[in-house]
Amino acid sequence: AQKITQTQPGMFVQEKEAVTLDCTYDTSDPSYGLFWYKQPSSGEMIFLIYQGSYDQQNATEGRYSLNFQKARKSANLVISASQLGDSAMYFCAMRDTEGQGFSFIFGKGTRLLVKP
Amino acid sequence: KAGVTQTPRYLIKTRGQQVTLSCSPISGHRSVSWYQQTPGQGLQFLFEYFSETQRNKGNFPGRFSGRQFSNSRSEMNVSTLELGDSALYLCASSFAGTGELFFGEGSRLTVL
């Protein structure tokens, strides 16, 4: 069965420093994609970045980048130059390809707190 | 372009009552899915609709149901509410059931 694991329940980072949020995954599907979402206290899940299993390069979107290590089945999110507004829950997810339709599997999330 | 809109944002119910939550997807999106988020279980998939057809359902009891209308708007219903149904219910839409999910701000249900 597919699975997403985020082992860091909470993280602290000093403002303007970089932080890495861990995500490991398990799937038998050779074609898959990893997604990262940010959830501020308002509740809305905001899409951050996507990495496809066949992408040759690690994905980057502004201050967000993915450290994708396929052999290790890890897709860690790196946030550079942290800002106070980055304080939120962060979820790693992948599409569930074992069922019908279109659904995602999410990790338990990591709560990031950026300190001034 | 308007985002995903969920109503109501907050509601309080008592055990045994029923509740209906509404979701309006991004214009042009035909896939609408629902997720339940609780501190203990995290985000769990409820069901997904595409062109008014339920394509997939998560592991939830029959008290949880949903539907999608011809304009892609969706509703979910929970009957005979239990304390454990207290959660944030998130609706998400996608263009054709591909790519990323676009989420609403959720409906926070409290069952007393």
Image: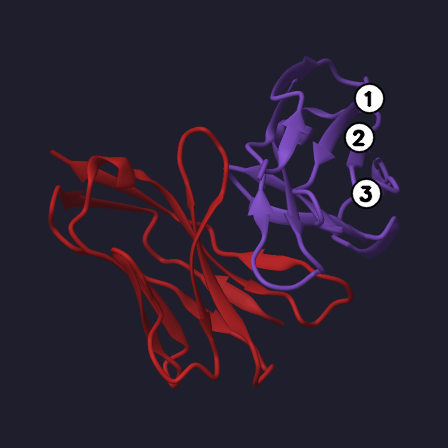
Chain colours: A red, B purple
Name the residue carrying label 1.
B18
In front: B79, or A35?
A35
The answer to the question of whether label 2 and label 3 lie on touching residues, with beta carbons closer than 8 A, is no
Residue type of the residue flagged with mark 1? Gln
Up-down: is A101 above or below B7? below
Which chain is indicated by disc 1? Answer: B
In front: A116, or B88?
A116
Task: Say the numbered circle drawn on residue B78.
Answer: 2
**Can you name the residue that lies furthest to the front here?**
B1
Of the numbered discs 1 and 3, the one sitting upstream in the chain is: 1
Q: Is residue B103 left or right of residue A37?
A: right
Closest to the camera, between mark 1 and mark 3, is 1
Local packing at callout 2 (Cα closer than 10 Å; few below 14, some 14-19, many 20+) is some
> Do marks 2 and 1 both belong to one polypeptide chain?
yes
- Residue at image location 59% in from the left, 70% down from the top: A2
Q: Tag 1, which secondary structure?
A: loop
Screen quadrant of the N terminus of chain B? top right
Q: Give the quarter of the image for residue A89.
A: top left
In front: B15, or A79?
A79
Residues at marks 2 and 3, CA–CA distance in whole angstroms:
10 Å
Task: Say the numbered circle drawn on residue A32.
Answer: none
Which chain is indicated by disc 3? Answer: B
Which chain is indicated by disc 2? Answer: B
Residue type of the residue flagged with mark 2? Val
Residues at marks 2 and 1, CA–CA distance in whole angstroms:
6 Å
Of the numbered discs 2 and 3, the one sitting upstream in the chain is: 3
Name the residue carrying label 3.
B61
- Residue at image location 47% in from the left, 84% down from the top: A54
In front: B26, or B106?
B26
